[in-house]
Amino acid sequence: TLYKEKNRPQFHFTTQRGWINDPNGLIFYEGEYHLFYQHNPYERDWENMHWGHAVSKDLIHWQQLPEALYPDHLGTMFSGSAVIDYDNTAGYNKGNTPAMIAFFTAASPEKQVQGMAYSLDKGRTWTKYDKNPLIDSKAKWNSQDTRDPKVFWYAPSKHWVMVLNERDGHSIYTSKNLKDWTYESHVTGFWECPDLFELAIDGNKNNTKWVMYGASGTYMLGKFDGKVFTPESGKYYYTTGSIYAAQTFANIPASDGRRIQIGWGRIQQPGMPFNGMMLLPTELTLRTTKDGPRLFNVPVNETGQLFTPVKEWSNLTSGDANSKMKEFYDSDRLRIKTTIKLSHATDAGFNLFGQRIIGYDMNGNLLNGMFYSPQDMTSMELSADIYVDRTSIEVFIDGGAYSYSMERKPDENNREGFHFWGNNIEVKKLEVYSVKSIW
Ligand code: FRU
């Protein structure tokens, strides 16, 4: 597609027309990454939820396909996930072709129930299970909020696991055939769009933790025995801001082994025939920090193909850095990597036309208003990898220890352009990259 609209993001997925929110059914299969997503094909506002569909060979360039799931007698199609049924547990496989099976919430004004559908042609066309719903738990929870099934295979017990948002947290269900589900347990303190997966600490496969997360970028680490998730940590943020309802990919080959995530960018696209966007695909890892293991989040390696180094400087005063950045004022997209060193300042940061991209209050341990405590307090340095597209900004701090995203909203009356601020700060490193368009 050759998009020509003024506000079309240039290196993020957007749909041709209509509203999008959560990514759904993220799965890799036969060389393709599938991105299904909450889609209102008819309007720029949230309503009439369908599952839209796009595919990619590299997580960067996407081809939009026809809608995958349409509303039915049980309701509109809310968020969910997908698996490949290699062992034919549900009985839909044909010859050597395993079924791709999607789990979704059918939402009606009365209640939200869970359903499934299968595809034998790489997600292009879908048949719904004739005995949907699989789970109807409104009465049990006395709640309308029973949704967003995330299903995966738990090899040690040879059963399927479904994590489902129910009222005030995430429930675990299990099944042998993907059709009959048994309730097992519940953990409170999460809201919408669950995910649950095992990650190696510092890449060591013999030392793992399970990560449970919800829609707003919070997570807990713990143990999982196939039926019960037992938290072993507090609840932390690994990312904040415009991101919501992120999900990780299923069926990534073991030879790759990454935990790859895409999140919805809750970002308005003014005057455009589409609304909302997906943020950059990122890789999640668990690393040891001074506070224990924590989730790190950085853009996937595949994003590298988008960037060409343009300029690089070291050890600048903020005044020098500001004048070097003048030539980039009018860029519609850029990547900027920088390290700032505070010495006299307890407050420092980086603005773009008055919009605060980085605002670090070292004294209060606050980064753009959220608690952030760097690993190395003695160096007094903060590094940031900043991705600016036409309508969004994503910031990855200190190698992904923390990240956040925001709408790009320059203050029209502020002509200060790129602007480093803070008493006597040093811009230790400043790199600028141009960014290719994916369309
Ligand atoms: C999260 C969410 C989900 C729901 C979907 C509906 O953004 O509210 O809980 O399934 O959006 O579009």
Image (cartoon, rainbow, N blue to C red):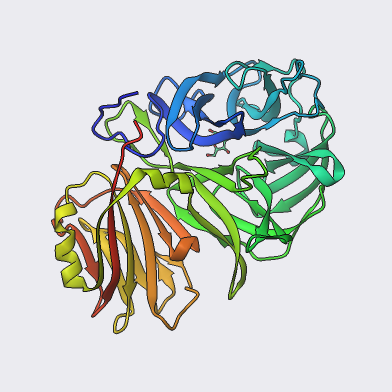
- How many labels, in total? 0
Q: Is residue 428 left or right of residue 394?
A: left
State which quarter of the image contains the C terminus.
Answer: top left
Q: Would you say residue 193 is visible in this rendering?
A: yes
Asked where in the image residue 290 lies, by quadrant, the reply is: bottom right
Relative image position of residue 288 (x, y in whole percent): 61, 69
Q: Is residue 439 above or below residue 214?
A: above
State which quarter of the image contains the N terminus.
Answer: top left
Q: Is residue 257 above or below residue 426?
A: above
Relative image position of residue 10 (x, y in whole percent): 32, 37
Q: What residue is shown at x 23% (from left), y 44% (from top)? A: 332
Relative image position of residue 28 (x, y in whole percent): 60, 34
Q: Is residue 260 above or below residue 348?
A: above
- For ligand 1, give the image quadrant: top right
Q: Is residue 228 left or right of residue 32?
A: right
Asked where in the image residue 378 lies, by quadrant, the reply is: bottom left
232 or 209, which is in the foreground?
209
14 or 47, which is in the foreground?
14
Relative image position of residue 284 (x, y in whole percent): 56, 53
Q: Would you say residue 280 is visible in this rendering?
A: no
Farthest residue toward the front? 255
